[in-house]
Image (tube, helix red, strand yellow):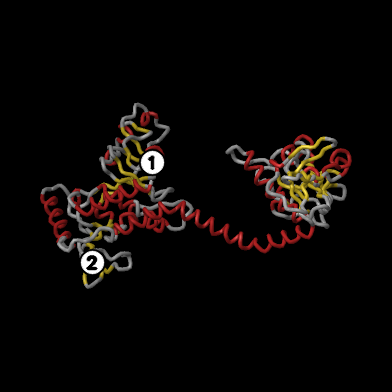
Amino acid sequence: MIVFIYLFYNTSYNLHYEQIGKEVRCIEDELPFEIPNGWECIRLDNLGIYKKGPFGSALTKSMFVPRSDESVKVYEQKNAIQKNWKLGEYYITKKYFLEKMQSFTVKPGDIIVSCAGTIGETYIMPSDIEIGIINQALMKMTISETIKIDYFLLVFNNIIKTVSTNNSKGSAIKNIPPFSILKQIIVPIPPKEEQKRIINKIKELEPLIEKYKQTEEHLYALNSNIKEQLKKSILQYAIEGKLVPQDPNDEPASVLLERIYKEKQKLITEGKIKKDKNESIIYRRDNSYYEKLGTIEKCINEEVNTDLPNSWVYLRLGEACNIINGFTPLRTKQEYWSNPTIPWFTIDDIHLQGRKIYKTKQSINTCALRNNSNRILPKDTVLLCCTASVGEYAIAKIELTTNQQFNGLVIKPEYKLFINSTYLFTLTSSFENALIKMAGKTTFNFISVKKLSSLLIPIPSLKEQMYIANLIEKINYILE
């Protein structure tokens, strides 16, 4: 029986009242909006018959049997979510169905609703369905002919969203609200012709709504990524020499290369470094970039992505830095880990304190470095991940060692007068795309020292390096 909520006329104003038996009460505060003339109001409970699936113990997997002439289908959430009654392979015996489960039978025209996890998904069961029942995660609804089923679904979907949000109390919504709440919801019912017009208008608007939704999602994605994208764009401009105005009085790249060469010769003469027979020298000539390795010269235009200002030079990372592999001492060797005194860096330290490393979560004993003393990295070493989380980076503000995921970039003695470690650290944040490309499409990302050594890095004057590093740090701070 449909119980209507009646509108009584008052000389001053119209109000909605509900009459149950002899009791009459005003329900104006419960109405979702001002009800137009000619519309009725009905509580959801009176619009149909609703039934939630059986309790867990009444329907378990141990009861399921293969499909046969003597079995009855068990409908699941995926039938409602994917709008397909044919999905699923769960069946119970016809005997158990007749004894205990008939009240959960689904008929053509019934609506099934997902009630847990992905809640509120609805599906009108078509005329050719198998005889079956709903499981614990579904509710079935048999709706009165008083209301068009498409109109009901519009209203019901809105009710589920509104009530679920109001009852979620800030937590994730995992289950459909209790029916004790749902059944009290007041549903405005227009005349059937008006229901048709509303349905048709909604169908007309759906493509526009979907387009708006996609636009909104795209805008949200842009807003979510704008800070990181802006950081990367500013950094890219900086390392291309486009962020800082270039001073025409700066010494040309040829002079910088000459100064580097003289510093090398000085250190070789003093016995502090050895002469490299295959040292890399990169220079520009006739609007092209060339590299000289020993006595061999070749054009490297294909490797160069950016035409640098006249005062800048390109260096190979392996030419400018000693690249030191990290390592992990054997965990089975207790002496390597007992009484530890040497900080041992892992990616966890970035997660715990950021990219400037002043301490490490783990440390190792000096005996772990008995044959690896050169793996102790000095303060201001740039740490670069070349395995798994390729492109992660940090800078050591203390002397430390690293695990095998990271390589230490230690500026060579002959370049200490020409490359600032803070600039190298800033520059490293731009390596990610190049490193991923180097790693290639493999199951496990890995970049060898040889590959890493070949990376081209842009080097301006020390003054400009410091300006860029400080400016990028300020910009990143503002954008955080």
Residue reaching furthest front? 11
| Between marks 1 and 2 in the image, the one whose residue lies nearer the viewer | 1
Type of residue at label 2? Ile
- Which residue carries the number 2 mark? 296
* Image quadrant occupied by the N terminus: top right
Q: Nearer the viewer, residue 249 or 369?
A: 249
Label 1, on which residue? 350
- On the picture, is 169 further left or further right than 99? left
Q: As rendered, which of 28 and 253 lies closer to the eye?
A: 28
Q: Secondary structure at mark 1?
A: helix
**208 shown above or below 423:** below
The amino acid type found where label 1 is placed reads Ile
- Give the image location of residue 439, x and y in percent: 41, 55
409 and 208: which is toward the camera: 208
Identified at 28% across, 51% down, the residue is: 471
Does the rendering let one see residue 99?
yes
- Using residue 139 as the reference point, say whether residue 253 is left or right of it: left
